[in-house]
Each structure stands twice: as structure tokens, then as C-alpha cells.
Amino acid sequence: MSKNKTTDNDKRFRRIVADFKAIKGAKVQVGYFLEEIATIAAHNEYGTEIDGKVHSPERSFLRSTFDNRKAHYRKLAIKYMDRIINGTLTVKGLLMLLGLRMTNDYSS
């Protein structure tokens, strides 16, 4: 009986799994975070009402941009998966790239 030994020299899979575990629960946050600017953005996004009367109409730019570009963001994530696999991009790096792309889309 011969003894065959299989050795896993490819550590990519373990690295990728560890990379995903490290970002468990991570979120891509895009928007306006300074209170004054966030208030103006919220008024534009949802509109405002005073005493049940419309003061300014809803002019969605965050939700509508995300809804219109959602498929593009998914394709972009898939496009970069090969870089995660070959080790030239981390999962955290991908999330940062997506966040930058979203920020650019919201600003244009």
C-alpha cells in the first residue's frame, strides 16, 4: 500500500476566507455626514412639510442614483473578484472602490 500525501500549498483560499471574515458586518457608507449638509440633503431627498402642507418637493438624488446604478455596482464588484482571488486587491479595498464610485455618481 502506497502512502500518498496531498499538500495544500495554495493559501489563497484561506486568505480570501480570512479577508471576508475580517469585514463581516462592514458597510459602505456614502452620503453627507456633517449635520448642516446632511439636513439640506435630507430636505432635498425627501422633501419637507410644514403643517401638512408641502414646503418643498422630494428631489431624490441618493436613492434614485443607487436604484439606477445598482446593477452597475454589482457588475463592478464581480469584475474585481479576480483581483481579490489573485491577491492584488482585498475585500476591504473593493468596498472602498465601490464607495468611491458611488460618491462620484452621487456628485455628478
Image: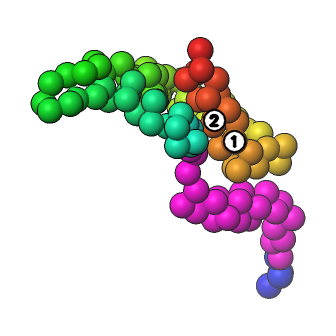
Real-space CA distance between mark 2 and mark 1, rounded to the nearest whole angstrom: 5 Å
Residue shown at 59% from the left, 29% from the top: 102
- Residue 12: in magenta span: yes
Residue shown at 39% from the left, 24% from the top: 44
Q: Are marks 2 and 1 in contact (CB under 8 Å)?
A: yes
Q: Residues within 10 Å of mark 2 (few under 14, many from 20)?
A: some
Relative horizontal placement of residue 49, taking residue 101 as reference (left or right): left
View extreme (bottom): residue: 1
Residue under circle 2?
98
Q: Is residue 45 visible?
A: yes
Amino acid at the residue labelled 2: Leu
What kind of element bears circle 2?
helix
Residue shown at 83% from the left, 82% from the top: 3
Q: Residues within 10 Å of mark 1 (few under 14, many from 20)?
A: some
What kind of element bears circle 1?
helix
94 or 61: which is nearer to us? Answer: 61
Range shown magenta: 5-29
Residue shown at 61% from the left, 29% from the top: 103
4 or 22: which is nearer to us? Answer: 22
